[in-house]
Image: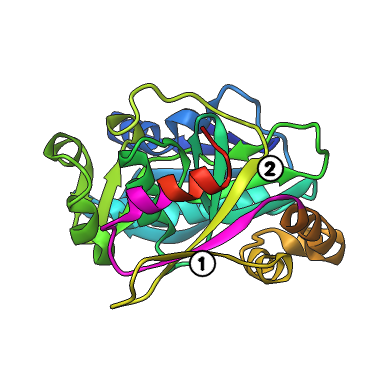
Amino acid sequence: MPEYTVSFAGFHVAIEYDSDEVHYFLSLLFDDLHSEAQVAEHEKVLRVAQAEVAGEYTLTNTGCESFSGALGVHFAAMLFDAVIFNLLNRNSHGIAFHAGAVAYQDKVILLPGLSGYGKSSVTTCLVTQGCSYLTDELYFIPADEHAPRSPFTRPLCIKYGAVSAVKRLVDEHALDNALGDEYGYIIPHRLLNPEFRQITTSPSLILIPKYQAGAELKIEKISAAQVSTHLMACDVNGRNLEGHGFRQVIQIARSVPTYRMVYSSFQGVEAAMQNLFKVLHWK
């Protein structure tokens, strides 16, 4: 079978595929992470192939059938989970945060958050208001401060519960060209960010989004101790690191200004962010 290699933060996963339909699907999901790297013996090979049921495909991980279904949003979520797990399973060279990231005037804004915090929705909001997209899922900060930072650049993945809010942000052209079903939307980020370029500098701002029904929009500065606690909760590969990466987290928390954004809708976000940029003296 031909292989499609996904590379991130120095590690690689190969995905075997058996049809043009699967190759198109893999390109939709991983185009910015695709490489020609040769996968070493200790690294992972996954397989996506047609199932016996017409219109369904099987994701196989380590020789065991792990998921079957149509090539839609749910299948993509399962495949992302399998790929990310295997990319990070042996990575001890730095911290991978469950986080979105955008850039404003080449300054990286990190948006760490667990599932349900709304990081993908807020990332989408900021991209539609002039920021450049980097990721809505994972951001790797190596222990070597001179090494480039690595966003896991994939399409924007919007869960079903956030679709109505995102539809008010994204124009019809982008939605018409997105992959959508009952599980949500996968929106190729270049539909929103056509002049995309990768930025690998350290974050200049950490913005922690928190959706709270009925809450008024509020952006407030938080302490290094508070952000350290939050970042440790978003540390995906901490099991591989000495002290679960706490020393590196403390360094990040002390060196990067951090704010919490509580919101229930995106009304007023653009003005609030411009006020924050003024406070930070970002021109």
Query: Disc number at residue 124?
Result: none
Does the rendering let one see residue 253? yes
Secondary element under disc 2, as helix, strand or loop, is loop
* Mark 1 crowd level (few <14, some 14–19, many ≥20, 10 Å Cα): some
Q: Nearer the viewer, residue 29 or 262?
A: 262
Residue 7: quadrant of the picture:
top right
Which numbered tag is attached to residue 114?
Answer: 1
Q: Position of residue 68 (x, y in %)?
A: 34, 58
Q: Which residue is mark 2?
A: 43
Report the magenta residues as a range. 255-273
Q: Would residue 195 appear left or right of 256 to someone viewing this image? A: left
Q: Earlier in the sequence, mark 2 or mark 1?
A: 2
Numbered label tally: 2
Position of 125 with respect to 102 (left or right) is left
Q: Who's the residue at 63% across and 68% down the image? A: 230
Q: Nearer the viewer, residue 89 or 135?
A: 135
